[in-house]
Image (cartoon, rainbow, N blue to C red):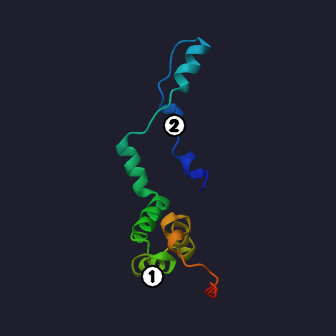
Amino acid sequence: MNIADPLSRLCIISDCKKTSDDEPVNQIVENAKPCAMSMAENKMHSEQDSEIRKVKVLDAAHEGHPGIVGMERRLRTKVWWPKIDKDSGCPVKSCKGCTLVELPNQRWELLDAP
């Protein structure tokens, strides 16, 4: 995760309510209150954020747990961005459902019956 992404969503301190009181304690308390973004602002900025759009597209392509090859096939028919193959592998590798059904890399040897 890019550290700049969460930091870019912090509130702007200049928008916070300022006190005219000269007491340092009151100034600290007033300026320590978080100034949250409205849902409309959050939605507007989220729609413009390319990383959030990538995550939504990857989640949609991962529906049904198609595996890495299936996800890459789905994505290539609709979208493209640099390093799309690398990004498409991340949801599959971190998905418990996908890792449980994945075949082992080595062949199993059959045991002779007793």
Query: Residue at the spot x=43%, y=70% of the render?
Result: 62
Q: Nearer the viewer, residue 71 or 94?
A: 94
From the top left corner, tell me how far across and down residue 39 is, in percent. 36, 43
Q: Nearer the viewer, residue 65 or 90?
A: 65
Q: Which residue is mark 1?
A: 73
Dot 2 amino acid type: Ile
Query: Residue at the spot x=57%, y=73% of the render?
Result: 86
- Secondary structure state at the residue bearing disc 2: loop
From the top left corner, tell me how far across and down residue 72 is, in percent. 48, 78
From the top left corner, tell me how far across and down residue 29 is, in percent. 55, 20
From the top left corner, tell me how far across and down residue 111 is, in percent. 63, 85
**Is 8 placed left or right of 112 in the picture?**
left
Query: Image quadrant for the N terminus?
Result: bottom right
Q: Nearer the viewer, residue 25 or 84?
A: 84
Q: Which residue is mark 2?
A: 12
Dot 1 amino acid type: Arg
> Up-down: is 30 above or below 112?
above
- Mark 2 neighbour class, 10 Å CA radius: few under 14, some 14 to 19, many 20 or more: few
Q: Mark 2 to mark 1: distance in Å?
A: 42 Å
> Up-down: is 87 above or below 29?
below
Residue 82 visible in the shown view: no
Query: Image quadrant for the C terminus?
Result: bottom right
Residue 70 visible in the shown view: yes
Circles 2, 1 touching at the beta carbon (< 8 Å): no
> Depth-wise, is mark 2 or mark 1 nearer the camera?
1
> Up-down: is 70 above or below 53?
below
Query: Residue at the spot x=47%, y=65% of the render?
Result: 54
